[in-house]
Image (tube, rainbow, N blue to C red):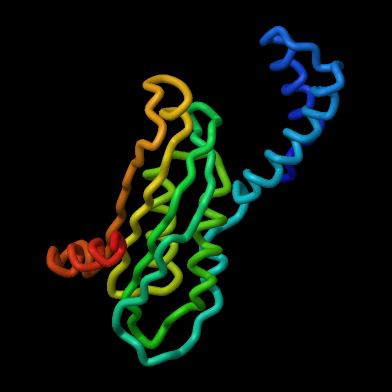
Amino acid sequence: MQIDQEKIQQAVRMILEAVGEDPTREGLLETPARVARMYGEILSGIDQDPGDHLQTIFNEDHNELVLVKDISFYSLCEHHLIPFFGKAHVAYIPQGAKITGLSKLARLVETAARRPQLQERLTSTVADALVTHLDPTGVAVMVEAEHMCMAMRGVNKPGTITVTTAVRGTFLEDVHLRSEVFHMMRS
């Protein structure tokens, strides 16, 4: 699906008018076009399968933890269309000598984040893509994010961090292993 830039521009002009602004004044004249381009960029993952980044598989006899921490991301709250942002920590235990490039995990998070959604869904999407494409023995994903819908409206609590997790396979079954990986993610 291609983002309809003109439709977004019309909508932004209408919003500006609805809040009492003049969309033809100098400072706002190019705002609708800038907003349309921004939405094209920050929502570029809508029609992409985040798991496509996991097509690159390496055969390496490694069957212990792989963890990439502090993967920065930006997403959009589907309830308010306001950003939430933070860091994702992605871990998996390979099996059958199937590993992927470390950058592919960051690309997975990036693509999964570029759509309107809930943080809980983002967390599960990353975990499920790893299970589907790598068939690891276990997956653990932790996402820590600040939601602008909580920081600048509603309860007005900037700095509040929401943490969500998704575990699959051995991390779901083994409490000790799950505790160990979550400790590593937070340290």
Which residue is pictured at 60% across the width and 46% down the height? 46
The answer to whether 135 appears left or right of 104 in the picture is left
Count numbered badges in the picture.
0
Name the residue at the top extreme. 20
Please provide percent x and percent y for residue 20. 71, 7
When the figure is inspected, residue 117 is found, relative to residue 167, above or below; the finding is above
Which residue is pictured at 54% across the width and 31% down the height? 82
Quarter that holds the N terminus: top right
Please provide percent x and percent y for residue 127. 38, 60
Q: Which of 102 and 45 is in front in this view?
A: 102
When the figure is inspected, residue 158 is found, relative to residue 132, above or below; the finding is above
Which residue is pictured at 16% across the width and 65% down the height? 173
- Quadrant of the rendered structure where residue 175 is? bottom left
Please provide percent x and percent y for residue 60. 42, 90
Please provide percent x and percent y for residue 101. 51, 78
The answer to whether 183 appears left or right of 52 in the picture is left
- Quadrant of the rendered structure where residue 29 is? top right
When the figure is inspected, residue 63 is found, relative to residue 78, above or below; the finding is below
The answer to whether 68 appears left or right of 93 in the picture is right
Name the residue at the bottom extreme. 61
Quarter that holds the C terminus: bottom left
Which residue is pictured at 70% across the width and 40% down the height? 38
